[in-house]
Image (spheres, rainbow, N blue to C red):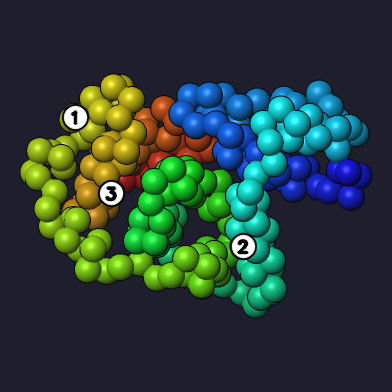
Amino acid sequence: MAGGQTREEVTARLEAIFSSAMEGEELEKALISIEKRLDKFEGKWGGLIKWAEQKYGKPEDSEQPIQEEKESVQQESEPSKQGELSREEAFSTLESIFRSNIDGNELKKMIGTIDKRLDKFEGKWPKLILWAEEKYGKADAKIEVAAEGTESPQETQGVEQTLELIIAGDHESALKNLKHLVSENPSDSDTWNTFSSYFSSIGLSGRAKACEEKAESLS
């Protein structure tokens, strides 16, 4: 089955299967194990996928959006305007689109895939956003502005509280604080160091290093 599939495609399939059947820490552990499973079953990925489907069930529609997204983004080959869009802006835009059009467990899953989507489509973020808008609808600007306007001062107090949130495992609140802090002062090295700590805490070492380098350049 996997004979004609790339490692990336098999990874996406396993992610879809696990995401449809698990959540929370169990899902995180399963996703982390994918690379090791691919190495262990090199040349037998078809059997690996079959095992996953038998054990956890086939994903209903979880694989389809990623496949449609891949085809949509790849259809256009002209140079993108990503230079005008930072990773944080792309992340925020995708998150707003998902929050405006999806809810419940599906929303949690989609938000959890944003970093992987940005990595997968590096260089094509504007097209990725366009795909998301066509698939789910545009972000509701009124809802987004209203949500930002109702944040209490305590929620965006500063890097010290944000670090406490990261240590406590409250990643969603920490990320909200960091986005606010960056928008207020994008040249603050302490904020970027805190961003580095955030990405390290969720296992994205590459993003953590990038933020650390950003902080050093601003020091």
Mark number for residue 78?
Answer: none
The amino acid marked with disc number 2 is Glu
Identity of the residue drawn at 81% across and 47% down? 6
Label 2 SS = helix
Q: Residues within 10 Å of mark 3 (few under 14, many from 20)?
A: some
Q: CA distance from mark 3 to mark 2?
A: 26 Å
Can the viewer see residue 18 in this picture? yes
Mark number for residue 160?
Answer: 1
Indicate the position of residue 62 as horizontal and vertical percent values: 60, 49
Q: Is residue 116 above or below residue 164?
A: below
- The tag earlier along the polypeptide, 2 or 1, is 2
The amino acid marked with disc number 3 is Lys
Q: CA distance from mark 2 to mark 1?
A: 38 Å
Foreground tag (2 vs 1): 2
Q: Residues within 10 Å of mark 2 (few under 14, many from 20)?
A: many
Q: Is residue 122 left or right of residue 210?
A: right
Q: Give the number of callouts.
A: 3
Identity of the residue drawn at 63% across and 48% down? 60
Identity of the residue drawn at 23% across and 42% down? 177
**Callout 3–callout 2 Cβ contact below 8 Å:** no
Mark number for residue 69?
Answer: 2
Label 3 SS = helix
Q: Is residue 89 above or below residue 213?
A: below
Indicate the position of residue 8 as horizontal and vertical percent values: 73, 46
**Callout 1–callout 3 Cβ contact below 8 Å:** no
Mark number for residue 179?
Answer: 3
Indicate the position of residue 113 as horizontal and vertical percent values: 52, 46
- The tag earlier along the polypeptide, 1 or 3, is 1
Can the viewer see residue 84 in this picture? no
Indicate the position of residue 158 as horizontal and vertical percent values: 16, 37
Q: Nearer the viewer, residue 151 or 68?
A: 68
